[in-house]
Image (cartoon, rainbow, N blue to C red):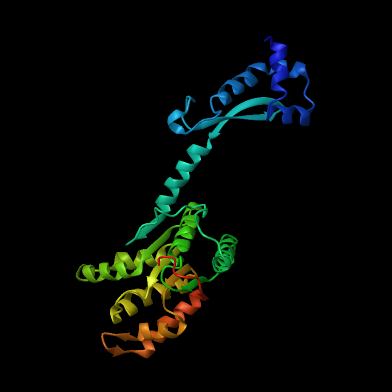
Amino acid sequence: MNKKDVISEFKKMEPIKTIVNKNSLSDEFLDDEFLTLYSYHLKKKKCLNCQGLQFCGQEDVGYQPVLIFNEHFNLEYAGCPFFNQIKNNVDENNNLIVVGTSLDNIDPTGNELKNNSYRNNLLLKLNEIYSDYFNNKNPKGLFLSGPYGCGKSYIMGLFAKKFAAKGQQVIFVYFPDLVRTIKAEITQGIEGYVEDLKNCDVLILDDFGGESMSPYIRDEVLGAVLQDRMENKKLTFITTNLDKDNLHEHLAESHQNIDDLKATRVEQRIYTLMEVFDFKDINYRK
């Protein structure tokens, strides 16, 4: 195949075809730019049908050629989809702290999530919060109440990953495990735990109500965290099996002692930070 035939083939390829048509480029011009176009063609060919970074044929692994036109053709490089996926996973992991559980089974695309009207309503609400958050509208989080096994934790884990992938510092904490950890560490001080919960961009307290509440946990941990996040308008979520009625009972009663006033204070912080969302889906674990 001679040079003229090669140029004819180039004119059929994207993105060369679009650039040529948009700028009315002549064959003579393409002849002058032949070395750049041919280099792009050879390097791009290495990316065809690639199965992953372990098979990458580029000199800089994970970087694919990009053809740029600004009066002349120039060859630049950008991360390929395989490279970007790994990079996004690394960024997400750096931004996401998970305590007392694992989110490894959660597909960040949400493709594995079973759809129904209950879940669709919840996903619409969470997507609205997600959009408002990144448009600086300071949305409330959710006090997500629903039965065991209905998918509350999975769905909030999915959004934890979404927020982390967008560069937000997220803590997803299984609350009963946090309570056990704090009780074990109480003699050594818990300032580090509390400060992390106060300062992260997005906080998700999972399975609230599954723990044995104590006045110390309620007032010095939960109350202090919620108060600070309320003052600084930080996005906060709670998943729970409690409804609005027995939330107060759970906060007020600890070790046979009833403390309505302090429970009400924490309760009001929850309602200031979060909107109550009754999630009526079924228990899929049965």
Q: Residue furthest front?
A: 286
Closest to the observer, 279 or 251: 279
- Left or right position of 241 against 180: right
User: Residue 29: percent from the left, percent from the top?
Assistant: 74, 19
Tell me, yes or no, if residue 201 can be seen here: no
Q: Is residue 203 above or below residue 60?
A: below
Residue name at image x 26 percent, y 69 percent: 180
Q: Quadrant of the C terminus?
A: bottom left
Q: Is residue 264 above or below residue 186?
A: below
Residue name at image x 41 percent, y 81 percent: 266
Q: Is residue 79 above or below residue 261?
A: above
Closest to the observer, 136 or 244: 244
- Left or right position of 118 against 154: right
User: Residue 44: percent from the left, percent from the top?
Assistant: 58, 26
User: Residue 20: percent from the left, percent from the top?
Assistant: 75, 27
Closest to the observer, 199 or 93: 93
Q: Quadrant of residue 225?
A: bottom left
